[in-house]
Image: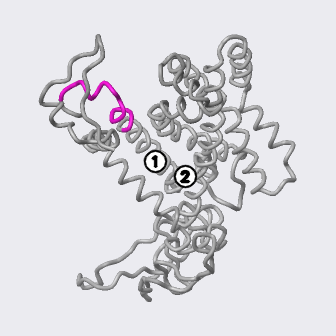
Amino acid sequence: MATTPTAPSPGAPPVPAKAAEEYRGFSLTALAWRRFRRHKLAMYASVVLIILYAAAIFSPFLAPYSETRSNRQKYFHPPTKIHFFDENGRLTRPYVYNYRLVDVGRRIYEPVTTTKYPIKFFVKGESYKLFGLIEWDVHLYGVDSPAVIYPLGADHLGRDIVSRMLHGSRKSLFIVIPLIVITVSIGLMYGGISGYFGGRTDNIMMRIGEVVMAVPSFYLLIALAGVMRDVPAQQRFAAVIAILGLVSWAGFARVIRGMVLSLRQQEFVEGALAIGNSHLRTIVRHILPNTISYVVVSITLQVPGFIIAESSLSFLGLGVQEPFSSWGNMLSNATDLTNLTRYPWMLAPGFLIFITVLAWNYVGDGVRDALDPRAVTSGEPR
């Protein structure tokens, strides 16, 4: 619903006439979107994130191989060179050569140039479930056997790095959804109840929250990994998500509690109680919605931390387990200095982690500026 500028509250800086005229007829959401669009880095970062998440959703189709497919004859295979010109320098259909091993100890390969293997698109390969529902076996690209196409090389088991990064992106990127749901839902209700009732209730609840904040989550996860050693990898991963969520809500709840402490003195709260609303309904329907700006900003700023947490745990063997892939456990194969100097493509997942975290931080900065209420009184939108 459109809103019109109102008189500034006492002590607030006046809204310039030019800014008031520009804002006239815009809803708060539209104003926030206008300010967000003017944050160029946030817009570019949003495009990067859209591409990354779209690639994660369609990863079985985009990846030429499954995340567990290995070729023991091709381990530490270098990145496959894609040729766009023939030997006479003429533009041709993209093709690759098969590679043969010439140095077993150092894993040095050289192309066999006697046969060309054209890159084919929309080829049939290993079957998979698109969106987890549709049984399909078509992949975006591939080459005929015995050649392989490893755009970023292969790991120590001869598995395609690109395919594993695409499949692993589902876990590394979408782990934030259950974590955010757990953190925000518990933090909102806990902080809202604590700040609304205040007094002894607030004191007891905050002390409990401080105990939760003091729990060393890293050591708790190590203990969990030891206890669940014989548990299937998927169930262990779910347990890690639950533990991370249950130890991450306390700090968020403290901020919500502080906001509710100031909101509960407002007239609209007294009005809601006067017309017969219960305390719980007043909290949920009237107080917590006024914290939505902070919640949105907090979510965008917490996502990078959750992605790094999953990657770190998987790197240490506490998260996603082999043979399944995530960006973190793929990086664990790059800890050997000798292998790293010989096969630098093993660091490719670290680059994706860096890009994703950087993009989320820029988006968080843009959202924070867009939802900043002081921006309305600063003249031109940011």
In-image side of 201 versus 61 (left or right) = right
Which residue position is annotated with label 1?
356
Task: Write down the residue under mark 2.
Answer: 173
Question: Mark 1 is on which residue type?
Answer: Thr
In contact (CB < 8 Å): disc 2 and disc 1? yes
Q: How is the image coloured?
A: one colour
Name the amino acid, label 2: Leu
Considering only vertical position in the picture, is 34 above or below 124?
above
Label 2, secondary structure: give it. helix
At 41% from the left and 59% from the top, the residue drawn is 51
SS of the residue at dot 1? helix
Q: Which of marks 2 and 1 is nearer the N terminus?
A: 2
Which stretch appears magenta? 367-379
Q: In this view, does 205 lie above or below 130?
A: above
| Quarter placement of the N terminus | top left
* Cα distance between the residues tagged 2 and 1: 9 Å
Residue 374 lies in the magenta-colored region: yes
Query: Can you tell which quarter of the image residue 264 is in?
Result: top right
How busy is the neighbourhood of tag 2: few (under 14 within 10 Å), some, or many (20 plus)? Answer: many
Tell me which corner region of the image, top left, top right, bottom left or bottom right, holds residue 360: top left
Please provide percent x and percent y for residue 137. Answer: 58, 82
In the rendered view, tell whether residue 95 sits above or below residue 72: below
Pointer 1: residues within 10 angstroms few (<14), some, or many (20+)?
Answer: many
Residue 88 horizontal/vertical position (percent): 24, 85
